[in-house]
Amino acid sequence: MKSKPSKSPLDKVLGRLDDLDEVNLGILVQRLARERKLLEIVFDVIRDGILVLDEDDILTYSNTEGRRLIGLKEGSTEKIFLQRAAPELARALGLGRSKEDTQPEVVIREMQISYPEKRQIRAYAVPIGDSIGQEASKNKVGTAIVMTDVTEEKDKLKAQIESERISSIMDLAAGVAHELGNPLNSINIHLQYLQRSLKKENADSKKTSKSLSTCIKEVQRLDGIIAHFLNAIRPSEPSFQKINLLSVIEETVRLREKELNNKKVKVSMEAGVREPMIRGDVEQVKQVFFNVIGNAIDAIPEGSEIRIISGLDEQYVFAQVVDQGSGISKENISRVFEPYFTTKKTGHGIGMMIVHRIMRDHDGEVGLDSKEGSGTIVTLKFPRKSPRRGLLESSEKSIQQ
């Protein structure tokens, strides 16, 4: 038999309101006012912005930093829809979903806002459950949003990543050396055989051909290992050109075709526009989807489905990779973009770091919606109007079903 959750002192007092006389009731009100003031002082000295919304997405509380980040006047007490106060933030966090829609356990976004000034922020949104102890996702009564201004960090991020990479270079080099050792030994053995066999007048041409074939395959494997290693430690500047995002996604899916077939995974494409055009580096954008789709394949069981949804809005051309796999825990979701962090037994921890770097270099955004045990949605947004280029043309005609 489960024990009932113990009540807080406040719950006990509130349960006896009918028994309180006017004097004690006044004392209780004063005490609650003092506690509220204390909490407000504490929240106002926190360097992160804090916003609290009710179930209708109306802003019911904001601390000083939260008001600064979304441009609300100091001392403003008017209740306002977040969609009106901070439309960029509300849109990025997916607020305004139908109440029947499945709510993610936690949402993380790293994004750029333009009002009241251009800033780069990292936002976490977590549904708030009721006081009865029900799960927030089943009995949501509001949303808590924590925002961190990472504008200055962005200037230091590249140097930090380089520092992390340098500190780990010896470990990576040791791993690469180990991987190179096996094929090199194999090549050496077969080359020695070729040397001996070619000296004989009656050399076995069939065995010679097989040895040559083995050498070629091993050399190709070495080339792949070295290319992957160099991409990780020596990123190149993107070469921008006008590309069709849908074509890049389709080509990347074909590159993963063998893994998809081995695991009997179906990929469904849902395109909102026929030609979603962006400016980007073809190979780097392909690398983004190669990594994200690879993570989805690893996360889902055999015979599952991966959905790829593409489209555009006023500011972005976007693509979402949706899986119903193992999901990401609350403890790990904030570490996804950290260099060399991985939960995979055979992972290197650089895949999502590379995704984050490429999206940043393309003035884009990457977001994660995940719930452990239910799956993950990775949203990739490429600006239609890049700071480097003008507005791109995209056909907004829906694909005929």
Image (spheres, rainbow, N blue to C red):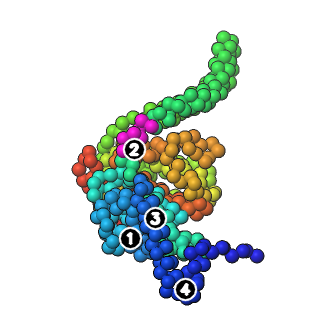
Q: Is the C-beta separation of discs 1 and 2 under 8 Å?
A: no
Label 1 or label 3, whichever lies nearer to me, is 3
Q: Which residues are magenta?
A: 152-160
Label ID, residue 20: 4
Q: Identify the main secondary structure in magenta.
A: helix
Q: Which residue is mark 3?
A: 38
**Separation of marks 1 and 2 at Cα, in angstroms:** 28 Å
Q: Nearer the viewer, residue 99 or 148?
A: 148
Residue 105, position as x, y percentages in the image:
53, 64
Residue 249, position as x, y percentages in the image:
43, 51
Q: Quadrant of the N terminus?
A: bottom right
Q: Which residue is mark 2?
A: 153
Residue 264, position as x, y percentages in the image:
61, 56
Amino acid carrying mark 4 in the image: Leu
User: 269 above or below 20?
Assistant: above
Q: Nearer the viewer, residue 312 or 148?
A: 148
Q: Which residue is mark 1?
A: 59
Quarter residue 187 falls in: top right
Label ID, residue 34: none
Q: Indicate whether residue 223 is drawn in magenta.
A: no
Say whether disc 3 or disc 2 marks the residue closer to the N-terminus.
3
Say whether disc 1 or disc 2 marks the residue closer to the N-terminus.
1
**Separation of marks 2 and 4 at Cα, in angstroms:** 53 Å
Say whether disc 1 or disc 3 marks the residue closer to the N-terminus.
3
Mark 4 Cα shell of 10 Å, populated few (<14), some (14-19), many (≥20): few
Label 2 or label 4, whichever lies nearer to me, is 4
User: 54 above or below 109?
Assistant: below
**Separation of marks 1 and 3 at Cα, in angstroms:** 20 Å
Judged from the image, the secondary structure of the residue bearing numbered disc 1 is: strand
**Separation of marks 4 and 1 at Cα, in angstroms:** 33 Å
Amino acid carrying mark 3 in the image: Leu
